Every structure is written in C-alpha cells, then in structure tokens.
Amino acid sequence: MNNSAPAKCSSYHHGDLHQALIIAAAELIEERGLTGFAMIDAARRAGVSSGAPYRHFKDKEALLEAVCQVAFMALTEQINATISKFEPGSAASIIALGQTYVHFVTSHPQFYDLMWGEHGLRDLESGHADLRASSFYTLANAVGSWCQRKGIEDKDPEDLAVKLWALGHGIGGLALYNHLDKFMPAADVNQLIETSTHTFLEGLSRN
Amino acid sequence: MNNSAPAKCSSYHHGDLHQALIIAAAELIEERGLTGFAMIDAARRAGVSSGAPYRHFKDKEALLEAVCQVAFMALTEQINATISKFEPGSAASIIALGQTYVHFVTSHPQFYDLMWGEHGLRDLESGHADLRASSFYTLANAVGSWCQRKGIEDKDPEDLAVKLWALGHGIGGLALYNHLDKFMPAADVNQLIETSTHTFLEGLSRN
DNA sequence: TGTACATCAGTGAACGCGCGTTCACTGATGTAC
DNA sequence: TGTACATCAGTGAACGCGCGTTCACTGATGTAC
C-alpha cells in the first residue's frame, strides 16, 4: 500500500524483513499483477538475497496471504473512515460505503484477484476471516439503521447488505476490466453507485 | 463445454485438430483452472504431440482466446434460450436472465477469469466483441420493454441494464468464491437474484 | 570489562521442474501430367 | 490408371527461461561466566 522507504539498514541483519517483504510484495503485485509476481523480486526489492524470505515465510503462498491480510486491513480502514463521516442511518452513508468500496477496488486493480478470487477461499479458515467480515457488518449496520429510521421492520439487514455488496462488487469488477466502457462511454462509477443504490433503497421503501 | 468424443482418427492427419484443441483446452481449464492449464496437456488430450498445436494457433494466448470465444457463444445461447421462454417486458424475464447469467457463472467457475478478468481486455478490439455485447443488449431490450409497459419513459434502458448486469455479476462472483456462505449460510443465489431484481424494479416504478 | 559460545538472520550458488516454443524431420494427401 | 511432386499436418527431441526452494556457509548479536 504505502511506501515507508526501504531505510537500507547498514548492518548484516535487516531491521524488520518480515514487514519489508510484505510491502515489497504488495508494491510488486500492484505494478505487475499477481501472475507476474516472483518471490525473488520481492527479496531483491527488500534488498536481500533470494533465500532470505524463507526465514520469514514458509513459501510464496504464505507471503501472499500476508499481503492479502494487509490489503483487507487497508480496506477496513477506509470503510471505517467513511462511515464515521456520515449520519448513522442515512442513505448517504450507504452510498458512500459503496463508493469507497468501488474506489478501493479500482485503485488497486491487481489486488482484486488476491482478495476476492481463488485466494480468498484459503483464507476462510484462517484467523483474519474476522477482518474480512468487519466491512460487511459495517454495511449491514448502516442498512439496519436506515431501515429502522424508515420504519421498515420486516427486512433482514444482512440480506440487504449482501445485495448491496454484490451491487458494488459487480460495478467494481466490471469497471476494473473496462467492460462498461462499451455500453457507457465515460461511465462514472460513483454516480452509478449512487443512482443504483437510490433505486434499490426506493424499492425497499415501497413495499 | 460439451464433450464430443475425441473420435480417435485412424490416420496420421487429425480430422479437425483446431476444434479438438479448443474443446480439450476448455475441458482442461474447467478441470484445473486457467493457471493450471498447459499447452502440452491440451495437445495430449487431443491425442497429438506437443508441437502440433502451433500449426493451428500462434501461441497459447491465441488458443485461450478461441476458448474464450466459445464460452461467450455458450453464454449467448443460454441467454437467448431463456429470453425466448418469457413474455417480452415481463419482470419474470428480467429475473430469469439474471438467473441464467449467475447459473452460467457458477457452473463454469474456471471460465470466470478467462471471460471477465484480464483476458477480457484483449478481446475488446477483436472481432467477437459483438458476441460479448449480444447478451447485454438482450437484457437492455428486456428492460426497455418492461419500462414501456410500466409507462416509465425517463429512464435509459442501457443504464438500467448496466446496473442489473452488475448486480448479477456481483452475486455470481461472490457466490463463486464462497464469500456469501459466511453471511448467508445456504444462500440460494436464484432467490437472491429474484428478490434483489424485484426490489430494484420496484424502486424504478416508484419514481 | 572481557572472552567463549550459541543462536539465527542473511548469503548465494545450485537444483529441479514445468512449460512454451522451435525445428529438422516424416508421412499422408491430392494434383498435374 | 499410374507416377512424380508439392504441400502441409503432425512428430518428438531439444532448447531456454523463469522461478520456487534448498542448503552448507558466514557473519552479526547477545548472553553466560
């Protein structure tokens, strides 16, 4: 994510190679994609020889998982920052969450597969599943508050959150790979999120 | 997609190796995924030596593109079959289109990346871009008819189609990698499509 | 304060594997005469 | 109908590259006495 300068340690021992490798890997994945990422490049970028990473990570997979966790931490942070800026239960807060999500996805195109693709499967049992869930519950809470405010009692906030999540996830995924360009030249994803969320919430109020 | 028996040709020359390789590649991708797919395996499965494919495809990329095209043809076929079964302009037809889409996505998990991931970018200029668009316009027409029927004149059917597509795309993508299990144990994607589409259309009627 | 020793992070050469692609070839097919 | 020849699909060995991972080593650090 953010680059906290290699800080070329003068000594034989690296200060915190573990962390340095994660940062290097994240940068490389952003630059060249998940497929183009090689273990040896991460080592080189961290200023270390090819074998060194194996003192800190069992194998490539383990390093990728660490990067994945960092990515989810960053997403969670942004989601939390967003929700704190809006009045609880407002439609605006729900829209903003969607926009934050899509913004994150399109800002880090190369992380999409790592976070939501096949790799996602493996993390399900691991410890940071909670981290992944955090953003979802933030959304579910926002939707729940909105329902309460509107006097909608018969809907399950988690069910609604799944649908809104899917909407954002779909817009993000399609925008990422330029599938929308053909049908909506100069599509504005923020507006897309805003209007579609509005329509959806409108539909809930109706019934 | 479907397996039309290798038909082991008795002669030195293969009957239609071009087609046989596409089928073999498609099967292998379905079995082992895009990453695990090797050119030599496709050759072997087609009953041919390692160099033979290069008489028919410039390189691995070209073969993958052919598989991608076949996949889009299959999707188009299913979409067309679905739309023909429903009354034009009915909400049911729109829901069924979404369900067909998601069914296709989850039935061929390994094609998702090939069709909608990075590979998608490369096809944009190629000849079969039309094929990709076909399903979209089927949806846009269905939505347009629905609007007309409801007397909704101020909405752009293509804009609405993009949103419904994104909804289905998101549900498909999340379901594919089991991201929904955690929040909706035993989630029924068909029902998810149905209810979310209903809510969305309801929202449109409202305003 | 100084010496001996255990620990362990980092080295860098090397191994091994998978796999995309090439190339000189072989054999089947079909056409010209 | 038969022969010579061009064409080209398929062979299979080989090359080369990238890259994940290992391993015997080296040197820095800190602790025990």
Image (cartoon, coloured by chain):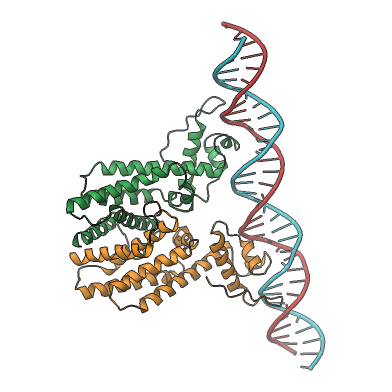
Chain colours: A green, B orange, C red, D cyan
Residue placed at 22% from the left, 59% from the top?
A204
Residue B171: percent from left, percent from top: 37, 59
Which quadrant holds residue B14?
bottom right
Q: Quadrant of residue B161?
A: bottom left
Q: Residue at x 38, y 42 (%)?
A: A74
Task: Please state the horizontal and vertical placement of residue B143, each as a whole percent of the image.
Answer: 28, 71
The percent position of residue A200, horizontal first and vertical second, equals 25, 60
* Res. B181 image quadrant: bottom left
Asked whether the viewer can see residue B127, the reply is: no
Q: Image quadrant for the C terminus of chain B?
A: bottom left
Where B174 falls versus B81 (above or below)? above
Q: With B3 as the anchor, is A99 left or right in this view?
A: left
Residue A84 percent location from the top left of the image: 25, 41
- Residue at x 22%, y 62% (from the top left corner): A203
Q: Count every numbered label the image shows and give the total.
A: 0
Q: Is any atom of residue B23 visible in this view?
A: yes
Which of the pair C30/B177 is nearer the observer? B177
Taking depth in this image into account, of B7 and B198 the one nearest to the observer is: B198
Tell me if residue B121 comes above or below residue B89 in the rendering: above
In this rendering, is residue B34 above or below A129?
Answer: below
Foreground residue among B60 and B187: B187
In this rendered view, identify the residue nearer to me: B99 or B161.
Answer: B99
